[in-house]
Image (cartoon, rainbow, N blue to C red):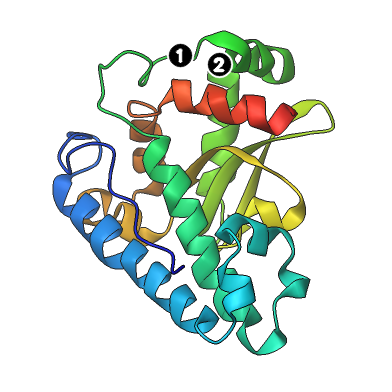
Amino acid sequence: MAYQLPPLPYDYAALEPFIDAETMHLHHDKHHQAYVNNVNAALASHPDLAAKSVDDLLRDLNAVPEDIRTTVRNNGGGHSNHSAFWLLMGKPGSPGIGGEPSGAIAKQISADFGDFEAFKKTFNETTAKQFGSGWGWLVFTGGKLKVITTANQDSPLSHGLYPVLGNDVWEHAYYLKYQNRRPDYLAAWWNVVNWAEANKRFEKAKA
């Protein structure tokens, strides 16, 4: 069955004033939809692969035929990354959205980074330095949380890592509101982080 664009779990304007409604319309309806369309087209003649989840394909890209591997890596990665990204955000001010985390992830952040502010600084500085398009991620590896970046739409799944938290730093994610001020966007994004979802993903990463 062909992959489908997941609906946003909130209204397009729900993340205002930190992420504007126009960006959300373009980002979700145009950019994410294009990734879905492109990966579906690549898999159309490979029903055995199309029957797998996109995450399973990304975990074993070497099993994808070479003639479509790059398309699946780029567009399947875009589909997977964005599907997580929408869920990892929510309406600012709602319970579990923005502010400091709670639960198991909060304890692990304190253990691995010292405190939440130190973690935010590491995440923002690392992600701001990602050259060109890409993502900043929080992953759990070797019993510790670690901040990494990936280029373009590369997924941590392809490196054997499960993304606990991720932020999109392609220009289409922020340029309408923040222009070239990526650090401002990164700083504002913490107001919409869905810590309940991050905690769920952290539990899965540890499993």
Q: Is residue 102 left or right of residue 111?
A: left
**Residue 184 visible within the image:** yes
> On the image, which quarter does residue 159 sit in?
bottom right
Mark 1 or mark 2: whose residue is earlier in sequence: 1
Look at mark 2 in the image and give the residue it sits on: 116
Crowd tier of the residue under label 1, counting other residues whose Cα lies within 10 Å: few below 14, some 14–19, many 20 or above: few
Image depth: mark 1 or mark 2 in front: 1
What's the CA distance linking mark 1 and mark 2? 7 Å
Q: How many marks?
A: 2
Residue 89 drawn at (x, y percent): 36, 34
> On the image, which quarter does residue 189 sit in?
top left
Give 83 or 194, whichever is nearer the viewer.
83
**Residue 133 visible within the image:** no
Q: Secondary structure at mark 2?
A: helix
Residue 103 drawn at (x, y percent): 56, 9
Residue 116 drawn at (x, y percent): 55, 16
> On the image, which quarter does residue 186 sit in?
top left
Q: Secondary structure at mark 1?
A: loop
Residue positioned 53% across, 52% down in the render: 135
Q: Is residue 15 left or right of residue 200?
A: left
Crowd tier of the residue under label 2, counting other residues whose Cα lies within 10 Å: few below 14, some 14–19, many 20 or above: some
Identify residue type, mark 1: Glu
Residue positioned 29% across, 58% down in the render: 27
Look at mark 1 in the image and give the residue it sits on: 100
